[in-house]
Amino acid sequence: MHLVYNQYTCMTAQTDDLDRRSLRRAFLASLSGTALEWYDFAAYSVAAATIFGQLFFPSSDQLASTLAAFSTYAVGYLARPLGGFIFGRLGDRLGRKRVLVTTLVLTGISTFLIGALPTHAAVGGFAAVLLIALRFAQGVGIGGEWGGAVLLSSEFGDPRKRGFWASAAQIGPPAGNLLANGVLAGLALTLTDAQFNSWGWRVAFLLSGALVGFGLWIRLRLEETPVFKRIAERGEQPSAPISEVFRDERRALVAAVLVRVCPDVLYALFTVFVLTYITTHVHMTRGQGLAAVMIGSAVQLVLIPAAGALSDRVNRRKLYLVGTIAAGIWPFVFFPLISGGSFAVLVIGIVIALAIHSVMYGPQAALVTEQFSPRLRYTGSSLAYTLAGVIGGALAPLLFTALLAGFGSWVAIALYLAVTAVVSLVGVLLSKDPDESEFADVDTRLSSSTEGATSSAGDRRSR
């Protein structure tokens, strides 16, 4: 009996070690993939706010150039639903891993080519056409990325800890934003304005080739998630997942879309538009803005998983409500604070804003995915993510710019964000708590594994 016990203990320990390795690898694959793709997206966002206007949409009117550049920023968001429709459906039918490799390649190639584009000075208006086409492809790739990345990490783990494990994909945006801002800020500091405008900005985009290669190496080594394996073994893959989501899980889709609106707008305000605002209305430098955003993004690397883990201990929906209310209030404090042009105050303001964002963004992946049944989760989550991006993040920089130009005051911008907070509050009220039957499924699976290990050990002992 003692030998059987020792054999069983050894087998269980080996199984647990294997599960932990798979879980850590899935967490890293989810984090690294989304970080690399958001590096691509963030590099474009910063370039659109600071330099693309004059390179691809030259005009004697600086506002017109900025609006044109931000319109290409919006194209990336408008393309996301197409990516959500295409890759979400494939992810629920063919599996998570295969689709995530494709989305990574698509986004990476698009970003690399942006770094090689001719500007308006070389080919005229055709440069803008090429930029928009690549931006569209970039958006399609990211539209299919998020839902799968969330499932990649969360479906390897215990659903009772979904808030933490799903936050791997949420760490990607600040990590990518930090990396992109760091590269661009470093180039801006080491090069003259003429050098940066001529060729320096291209370096950030061309670097994506090496970064995507690393991401592919991580993802190709990963197995398919246990949840999808069970769905496939039972033959339960949906034949028409998009139709099923719209027919059977409409409330879940509406709730998931609405909860995402406010965080998207908040993030666009404090990582993208803030760069335009401080250089045109507070007379601070682009470098100061980039540095402040980098510091805030670094803080988010810790706060996002912490908030995800906290949502596993307290009610996830209530925590999200707290963050949403704070998001609606903070801009009314932030803009008066930075009016004096103090860099330290700017840093504090952006850090607090992104901390508020973390309170929502950390638990968001778990909150969104658990609205849908497991067999429709890739499709439902991708649609919610991409549709919310169109409503929230896509239009935000354009609306911020137009509101500031039209009213000449930050108050209109703050009111706009407050309205989006109300929208997300409605989404939280429509949402539901996790389905506890998933916890029972995991307990049953673990119990079966334990019984199998005991039986195998007993058979070897009898022989």
Image (spheres, helix red, strand yellow):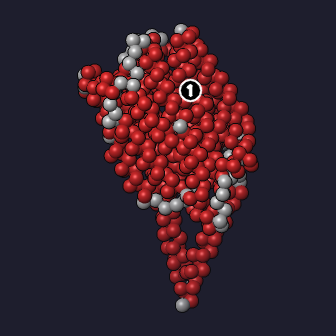
Q: Is residue 285 visible?
A: yes
Q: Who is closer to the viewer here, 196 or 308?
A: 196
Determine which quarter of the picture holds residue 392: top right
In the current view of this chain or complex, which residue is farthest to the bottom? Answer: 463
Q: Who is closer to the viewer here, 254 or 328?
A: 254
In the rendered view of the protein, which quadrant contains the N terminus?
bottom right
Q: What's the residue at 48%, 37% (across, down)?
A: 136
Determine which quarter of the picture holds residue 83: top right
Residue 422 placed where, x, y %? 68, 26
Residue 298 placed where, x, y %? 43, 35
Q: Is residue 204 visible?
A: no
Residue 458 placed where, x, y %? 58, 83
Picture layout, residue 17 above or below residue 55: below
Left or right of residue 270, residue 418 in this image: right
Picture layout, residue 423 above or below residue 343: below
Q: Who is closer to the viewer here, 119 or 338?
A: 119
Q: What's the residue at 54%, 19% (across, down)?
A: 400
Query: Label 1 neighbourhood size at 10 Å, few (<14), some (14-19), many (20+)?
Result: many
Determine which quarter of the picture holds residue 109: top left
Name the amino acid, label 1. Leu
| Mark 1, residue position | 395
Picture layout, residue 207 above or below residue 129: below
Q: What's the residue at 34%, 44% (across, down)?
A: 209
In the rendered view of the protein, which quadrant contains the C terminus?
bottom right
Picture layout, residue 454 above or below residue 379: below
- Count of numbered labels shown in the rendering: 1
Residue 30 placed where, x, y %? 48, 49
Q: What's the residue at 49%, 51% (across, down)?
A: 100
Mark 1 secondary-structure assignment: loop
